Amino acid sequence: MITIKSAREIELLKQAGYIVYETHQYLKPYIKPGIMTKDLDHLAEEFIRSHGATPSFKGYEGFPTALCISVNDEVVHGFPSDRKLQNGDIVSIDIGACYKGYHGDSAWTYKVGEISKDLEYLMEHTEKALYEGIKMVKPGNRIGDIANAIEVYATKHKLGIVKELVGHGVGTNVHEDPEVPNYGKKGTGPRLREGMVIAIEPMLTLGSPDIYIDDNDWTVITEDGSYAAHFEHTVVVTKDGVEILTGE
């Protein structure tokens, strides 16, 4: 069921979203060659808790850590570990924070040291695909309008669209209705209404969009080993259009 949030709920969702945004900013200086991904996870969890929130993902359906940290060919749901980031890697960090019962959710892909032009291209155009989707958010439009805008942009730039993974509603649960795919037809799907809160999150690859699930039953990896990027914002449908709740 799709819920319409009250002004009070939206204010709490804004606060949760801002904690997520601040956590991303806090982690940025630490994302460099040599750091272990589990150290980023520890830093983020301490930061989130110090701001009166709890990590949304830790314990969610058994997920073991505060962050999803996915490196190179890992699309989403990577486990923080002893793995050290290396020069030339890209790393997607998905952060959720729960503040007074309401969630913020945002993912961003970061470069580690110096990366190739192909990876710069992947990151640039996955981020731009996110904003193409956000442009479609306003009362009266439909979920399919968001999905189609992302698909058209990704296809134009010859990037693979991981179709099995979607965005979602956000509220008192980190994943709510409706699903927000990254491909689809204009004019289809649920209609957007003022007060709806959704996470839009294109997950694009440099090669095939085909994926498999790691033996840990969580981490999604590209079938052909191509690198993937993931950019996500939580947004609210406003009277006049859209407001991003997880930073700019």
Image (cartoon, helix red, strand yellow):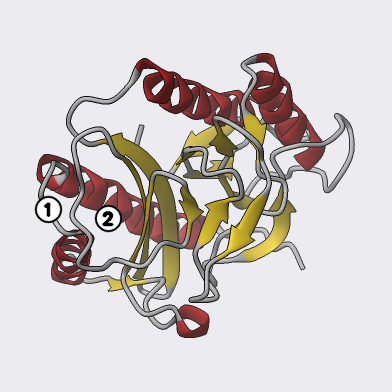
Residue type of the residue flagged with mark 2: Ile
Q: Label 1: which residue?
A: 35
Marks 2 and 1 sit apart, C-alpha to C-alpha, by: 23 Å
Residue 155 figure quarter: top right
Image quadrant containing the C terminus? top left
Q: Residue 19, image x and y in percent?
A: 27, 55
Q: Residues within 10 Å of mark 1 (few under 14, many from 20)?
A: some
Q: Residue 165, image x and y in percent?
A: 65, 53
Q: Is residue 167 left or right of residue 22?
A: right
Residue 67 figure quarter: bottom left
Residues 55 and 193: in front is 55
Residues 75 and 191: in front is 75
> What mark, if any, has residue 19 been given in the picture?
2
Indicate whether 79 appears above or below 245. below
Indicate whether 40 appears above or below 27. below
Secondary structure under badge 2? helix
Q: Residue 160, image x and y in percent?
A: 65, 33
Residue shown at 37% from the left, 39% from the top = 109
Q: Residues within 10 Å of mark 2 (few under 14, many from 20)?
A: many
Residue type of the residue flagged with mark 1: Ile
